[in-house]
Amino acid sequence: MNYLEHIGKYFMMLGQVFKKPQKFRVFYESLFKEIEELGVKSLGIIMFISFFIGGVIALQTALNLESPFIPKSLIGFAAKRSIILEFAPTFCSIILAGKVGSYITSSIGTMRVTEQIDALEVMGINSLNHLVLPKILATVFFYPFLIALAMVLGIFGGWIAGVLSGLFSGVDYVVGLQTDFNPFLVTYAIIKTLVFAFLIATVPSYHGYYVKGGSIAVGKASTQSVVWTTILIVIANYFLTQMLLT
Amino acid sequence: MIEVKDLHKGFGDVQVLKGITTTFEPGKTSLIIGQSGSGKTVFLKSLIGLHTPEEGTIAFDGRVNTKFTNEEKRQWRQEIGMVFQGSALFDSQTVEENVMFPLKMFTDQSQSDMLDRVNFVLNRVNLENSNYKLPAELSGGMQKRVAIARAIVMNPKYLFCDEPNSGLDPQTATVIDNLIQEITDEYKITTVINTHDMNSVMEIGEKILFLKNGIKAWEGTNEEIFKTDNEAVVGFVYSSNLFKKVRVAYLNETN
């Protein structure tokens, strides 16, 4: 199957996904279950990674700005920019594409190969709407909070790293954070997050839903879905940056 | 009653079903048999609407399923119960949630009414005290019984089973066969079973449809299958020495 066919099939899938849920009671149950599965259960890894990567960003910046003519507050300024603009929305989304994307593909793919999706269809249930829409809403609703948390913890990690290493003072770091703060950068990061969240939910769902074969095919589809979600996040990141910041 | 007329279905260049005409009557257990690749699964999936026929019609009590409006199709879907080969239970849900799922999706019953109905059908399939177990915690036979309970929870008019005995020991297979036949008699359901199990053919086959290379090669009852001289049927059903001996014994007894 060529790329154009995949793209067409992906958009046709979205056409089936965005329909009115058949039973709102069941839909809300699925939505809260997915928020827990795709969002709440990702809190730990995102908090852990954000804190330490924030620290590393601050340390690297400090080690590369050794000139006495450059104020130390620039470390906080650079760390803040790096974390808000790229690390939190893009890097964390790529991590989530790996963690959540493989989960989505393998769970939907297993449902396909064990005929659970056929069972839904025989009952007269729009299986794409039933399975994928709660995932999209869960990620699009929850990931902005997750990424906002990643921003805060990344910046905090940078502060801790500076204080513990003695490379810069906490005061300089905070001054840098406050320098030339542009709230639109946070808006830009949240817009990117919404797009990435949509990709993280839909691309793996596509790979899982149309899988054919057995467990090996599900494993391959999981790998492919992570690769394609990552590629699409990187491409979308480029175009969004071009559109929103230039 | 399900009436199938001149059903054709293919995939690409491969023609799988080549004009099947038959009927399945209510209150009777009908079995589809045939070698692997004979078109049984495609035929069953066409009956339940997972495949759209290229030619021919399938009428459910006079209603042709390819001509349904969306509302009629939704209604018809609720009249169908399906037991899949691997049970197809939702593995993230408990037994109770699995059986309750169609009720939640298609009725406005209160939680207690749904629970009463779930417990009733679970009792009917002799599966008490398993409400909170996950499918992975059940044996193959118990999973099949949950699948049957889920299939009948909406009081279906038509019950389809794809190899309900596969992977089960002979004793459990007989229990499942008897259960399906009892439910069929009790609720006057039109039941169609896809099977490779010759015990099922002998025991519950009130009507047997034998497919070969996508065509109907023979049809009759489990009494008639002993007497038939159709070479394809004899070659398939009596391929084992045991069933050859059973046939000889039956014919000696009846003559």
Image (cartoon, rainbow, N blue to C red):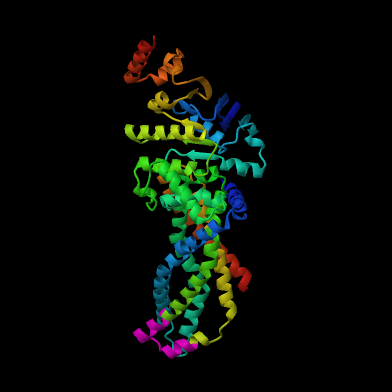
* Rendered position, B124 above or below A96: above
Give the magenta-colored segment's residue range.
Answer: A157-175
Residue B60 vertical placement versus B19 (above, below): below
Query: Which quadrant is home to the C terminus of chain A?
Result: bottom right
Total numbered circles: 0
Tell me where residue B13 appears, x and y as whole percent.
57, 30
From where the camera sits, is residue A11 visible? yes
Say if the magenta span includes residue A173. Answer: yes
Q: Quadrant of the N terminus of chain A?
A: top right
Closest to the observer: B76 or A81? B76
Q: Residue at x 43, y 13 (%)?
A: B227
Task: Please tell me whether residue A91 is drawn above or below residue B131 in the rendered image.
Answer: below
Q: Is residue A144 above or below residue B178?
A: below
Q: Position of residue B96 (x, y in %)?
A: 43, 51
Q: Residue B12 vs residue B221: left or right?
A: right
Residue B20 is situated, as x and y percent measured from the top left of the image, at 57, 24
Q: What residue is shown at x 62% (from left), y 42% (from top)?
A: B73
- State the residue in front, A31 or A109: A31
Q: Residue at x 44, y 90 (%)?
A: A171
Left or right of B168, for residue B60: right
- Secondary structure predominantly adopted by residues drawn in magenta: helix
Indicate yes or no whether the magenta region holds residue B157. no
Residue A185 spot, x, y in % from top left = 57, 77
Using the rendered image of the protein, determine whether residue A108 is visible from the camera's viewpoint. no
